Amino acid sequence: MRVGHGTRRLEVLPGERMGGYADRSQGVRDVLDPLEVHVVTFADHAHRFALVVADLICVNADVVDRIRAAVAGLGVDSCWVAATHTHASPEAGCAPGGSPTPAGVGDRLLEAAVLSAKAAVAAERDATVAHTRAWLADLAGRRNAGDAAATDIPVDAVVVADGQTPTGVLTVSPVHPTVLPAGNSDVSADLNGGIRRALGAPGRWVVAATGASGDISTRHTRQGRSAAEIDRLAALVAAGLGVDAPPPARRGGVTPPVSRSLRLAAKPRSEVDAAAGATPPASALTDARVREVFEQGQRIARDLAAKGRPDTYEIEVAAVGLAGLVIVAIPGELFLELGERIRERTGQDVVVLGYANGYLGYLPTVDTPPSYETLVSPVSAGSGELVVDAAVAAVGSVRDNSRRDNSVRDNEERW
């Protein structure tokens, strides 16, 4: 397999609207650390797959389609586009159900993605791919739970190596990158930018993506809301992953992506009415921010119900095989338990990527208690389980295709 990497800065405009917080009123003031767009290409003799990861609050289907069309001319056969979900970036149409990408943001993202893809294709070299996972005790937790509800967080890393030397790392952490507060008006990649810095080394590129982080954040583990705290938490990730000594390399090439189109029912009026009168979680009694965010969710739910909306939402759930490792792309905010359920049903060599190939919003389970996530979700309870089923089916198809391709390759080698 050949792997390449390219990156470009994502430019921002002073004063443009920032995304991520419902109670944020100020626009971009300055740059704390530059936003970036990264592209990693994985290629074998038959297929080239490109993963675009952008420091934005979300990517919607309209800009994903534009990027896919543009990079096809570079010899890219398939392409995914994911957002890191940093809340310190320009607004990109991150509304429940998705919305059109603001023209300026979309144009700048497209330009940076194409330039990064060109660089990645040009930089492709023979490499091996390995997968490692670390469970971290002090990185994050369930954001609407009390302080006592500590959660071990699984962070995945795809390690690209030349022999025994790691030349690239793709991390996927199921954590909302929200160290910086709503009052911040300086753009930043936030926690994912810190992870890139912490894992970076001469001759090694790092791409930091976000996984099934719907209900996970640093709310109860962070010790501040500053750049220094970003770097402290990122250091925990780097120490836990230990990528300097990569695990054994995996055998195989690229198994092209398989997509499953899924229609999810819009939240019925009964759920909207129930949300309006829902009682805040017990943690709201001791955490003013939990109560404030819960009330924001109730207002958003009422506003969403008052607007014209479709009866169903169609999304794309996809999977791709990379040397036997399978990466799953979810176009929204899947809860951590559901991301882990995909792995429980498909195996340990699966990585779940969120905020990819579109943005629907939160994907609640059938029994999730009322929370900000369930209130603002545009889809009915139980949609999360349907997404899991589609992901499991996509993984199964990728593995079937991989076995078939390996059988053909083995027969060709014997002849």
Image (cartoon, grey):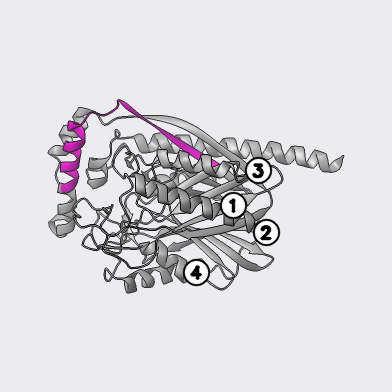
Q: Position of residue 372 (x, y in %)?
A: 23, 47
> Is residue 304 among what the camera can see?
yes
Q: Secondary structure at mark 3?
A: loop
Amino acid at pointer 1: Thr
Horizontal placement of 300 versus 95: left or right? left
Q: Which mark is residue 125?
A: 2
Amino acid at pointer 2: Arg
Q: Position of residue 413 (x, y in %)?
A: 83, 43
Rounded to the nearest angstrom, the CA distance separating label 2 from label 4 is 21 Å
**Residue 386 vs residue 147, the one in the foreground:** 386
Which residue appears at 16% of the width and 42% of the height? 298
Quarter assignment of residue 407: top right
Residue indicated by mark 1: 41
Q: Secondary structure at mark 4?
A: helix
Residue indicated by mark 4: 199
Rounded to the nearest angstrom, the CA distance separating label 3 from label 2 is 15 Å
**Residue 177 vs residue 123, the one in the foreground:** 123
